[in-house]
Amino acid sequence: MAAPREASRGPAGSPAAPAAPAAPSALAQLQALRHLTALLTQQRHRDTASESVFQEVLQRLTEARREAEVASADWARREHPEPCLQLAAESFRCLRNACVRCPANQGVIRNLNLIGVAVDFICLLLRSRAEGESPSSAVRCGLQFLGNIATGNSDAQDDIWKRGFPEMFARCLSHPDAKVAAYSSMVLFTCLDPARTEDLLQEKHLAVAVPVIEACRNHPEAGWPTLIVTERLVRRPESVGAVYAKLSDRARVTLPDVLLEKLEGGDAASDPDTTATLRSLAGPLADAFRRTCRSVPTLASAPNADRQEAPAAADLLDALCRMSSDNHLLGSVQACPGLLEAAVAVLRLAHLAGKQTGNVSTPSPLLTGDADSPSPAAGFKSRLLRLIGNLCYGNRDNQDQVRRLDGIPLILDHCRVDDHDPLLSQWAIFAIRNLTERNGRNQEFIARMERRGLADPALLRSAGLSVEERDGRLTLRSTARDGDPRTVNGNPRTQLE
């Protein structure tokens, strides 16, 4: 056994002052925090937690932030300071648990400025672009804490908004980690009231509003971005246009898609804000479709730029079809300048391209492939016909315009059964019926085509129409029963004069 060591002495030989007790190691601190986190999962421990407990957590979090701040200056070329990030994540978990159904703890934690410390730490990690599980875990846990302390606590919501908006939200919503985007949208939704929603929609803060809508597309499983759109943004339909203008063509479909899902699942009459927002989007959607739609028929030989436009055009067409199938939105879509002309023109272009190249737009039943193909051109013509039919439903001006554009023969030519696109003939038939509803001139036009051999009687019969001659006059008659004018599996309503 080693001999006992003599106590050290000072310069004059007197005993030295006793050393301060060593600070607990990082591992010991982490274990203590984990124990506290586990205790705070129970309501009885949350209700009896003292302020000193949270002061201790504040100390640990402050120390971890200081160490992370030193490391962040050279983060890309060194390993993450794992102990401090683990301590930060566990500190946030502890605070997260403490705030659950406990307003008293929320108040104590807020008074200790732990909200500000958390927001600053999260922003530090986001600015440093630190990659890996440890930084992401710390950010996720920090956001969960902010979400819990903000729940039912307007003072905490004010603090989060003042410290975290717009930077923290803008960085988190665009983060590659899906959970970071989801948790930040949860915090944002909790904090948004009418005044903050108006603030969010200001042009200088679109760096937050735009990622919210893009998150609906990129992280549909999150749910919170969708709630922000459907429960907050639609309350300001007059301000949504500024956000919409900043979106990419593909993301521009996301907003109407989310709102249509809500509208189709409820009563439009009881949701005037959503309806008003969708009506305001009809024109911009139509403009975007007109700009991109010609890229689809020429997809087989298009340059890369057009290949990027084609999926956007297909998505835009889908949105316009859905909007025009809703009675509350139909009039807004029918009134879009140039939309009908663009639809007829691109249908003709697709028809010609298919005949010339045998690409995916062709009507030939000999081609392989089907409407479920991942190509944006698959099923494109049937959706064009659906849109044209909706635009002409009960609208005499649009019915006449299709005739003047020489679109009736083009649509009749699509009434043939096509194995490549099974819905093609059905939507063509639907369009013909809506074109001839209460429109004697269009009926007469088709009857004269049949008499001159330009319209196949078999195609007319498949469309539920027949040509009769009475007193030397050709008349087009309906042989179909009435049905839903915008349902492909039913019999579209057709009333002939």
Image (cartoon, rainbow, N blue to C red):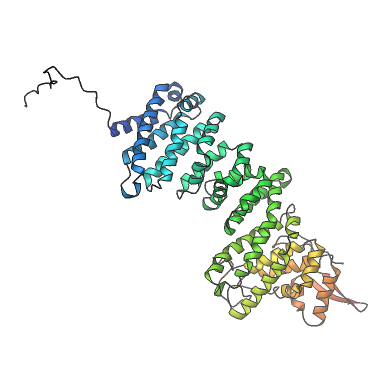
Image quadrant occupied by the N terminus: top left
Tell whether 169 sits left or right of 63: right
- Residue at the extreme front: 12
Count of number-bearing discs: 0
**Viewer can see residue 213:** yes
Kindly identify the residue that appears in the image at 77 percent across and 78 percent down: 457
Q: Position of residue 54 (x, y in %)?
A: 41, 26
- Residue at the extreme top: 14
Q: Is residue 225 above or below residue 39?
A: below
Q: Position of residue 385 (x, y in %)?
A: 69, 67
Instruction: Name the image quarter holding residue 158.
Output: top right
Q: Nearer the viewer, residue 46 or 201?
A: 201
Kindly identify the residue that appears in the image at 52 percent across and 69 percent down: 304
Q: Nearer the viewer, residue 260 or 301?
A: 301
Q: Is residue 483 above or below residue 350?
A: above
Kindly identify the residue that appears in the image at 21 percent across and 23 percent down: 19
Tell whether 471 sits left or right of 84: right
Image quadrant occupied by the C terminus: bottom right
Tell whether 352 sits left or right of 112: right
- Residue at the extreme right: 471
**Viewer can see residue 364:** no
Instruction: Name the image quarter holding residue 416.
Output: bottom right
Q: Position of residue 408 (x, y in %)?
A: 76, 73
